[in-house]
Amino acid sequence: MWVSQLYQGCEALWRDAKYAVMARNYAHVRELSASLRQARGDEQALRTWLYRLKCVEQERVTLPALRNTAYHLLGYWKDRLPAEDRRRLAQRALDDPAGLIAELGDRVRRDGPLYLATSYVFRDEPWEETVFRYQGNVYRMTVDATEALASGDPSKLLVRMDPLEDGPGRVT
């Protein structure tokens, strides 16, 4: 059960971190998506995946990647916006992608889509926590990679699962 639950937590963290990863380098999105699918059912591979995600978090956001991320996010609204708004926002993706992403974050919090509401691209916080449903219960997974990153050793990564209805969860 633990590995299956860990995989669900990793999927939820990926949902939350994917666009923040894209803001660093789109190639990481493809790499991490593929490696997460391959890690299913393998605790060590999932821990390595989490470590890799935390390594990417340490990288700098680049302007070209930020523009690409802004365009991707804008795609959620392109069919619902008047042509003039689409043009204005597309130009803003070029001129001020960080500002556009902040504007879209406000829009997400106000109108959805719900899928994006927990995205780290809209908040300046470490990518260390996610909430997900597993076998009918809701859990919070917290990842502490401080020691793992300092030592370069993925095995030192700490993962905590807390059921949101009950007491303390499992730490490994």
Image: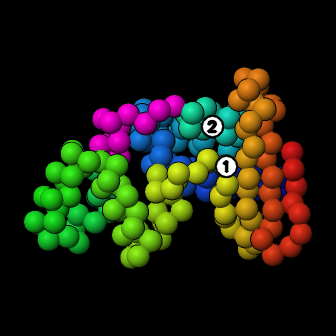
Residue designated by label 2: 54
For the point 73% across and 47% down, which residue is it? Answer: 143
For the point 10% across and 66% down, which residue is it? Answer: 84
Can residue 28 be seen by looking at this rendering?
yes
Can residue 113 be seen by looking at this rendering?
no
Region of the chain picked out in magenta, as a range: 59-69
Does 152 sit above or below residue 106? above
Residue 163 painted magenta: no
For the point 67% across and 55% down, which residue is it? Answer: 129
Of helix, strand and loop, which one carries label 1?
Answer: loop
For the point 20% across and 70% down, which residue is it? Answer: 81
Does 126 sit above or below residue 163? above
| Residue 149 in the image, given as x and y percentages of width and height | 71, 29
| Relative horizontal placement of residue 105, taking residue 48 as reference (left or right) | left
Q: Quadrant of residue 32?
A: top right
Q: Amino acid at mark 2?
A: Lys
Does 117 sit above or below residue 39? below
Of helix, strand and loop, which one carries label 2?
Answer: helix
Residue 62 painted magenta: yes
> Which class describes the residues within 10 Å of circle 1: few (<14), some (14-19), or many (20+)?
some
| Residue 12 in the image, given as x and y percentages of width and height | 61, 56
Residue designated by label 1: 128
Quadrant including the C terminus = top right
Q: Amino acid at mark 1?
A: Glu
How many numbered tags mark residues here?
2
Marks 1 and 2 in Cβ contact (< 8 Å): no
| Relative horizontal placement of residue 147, taking residue 112 as reference (left or right) | right
| Residue 70 in the image, given as x and y percentages of width and height | 32, 50
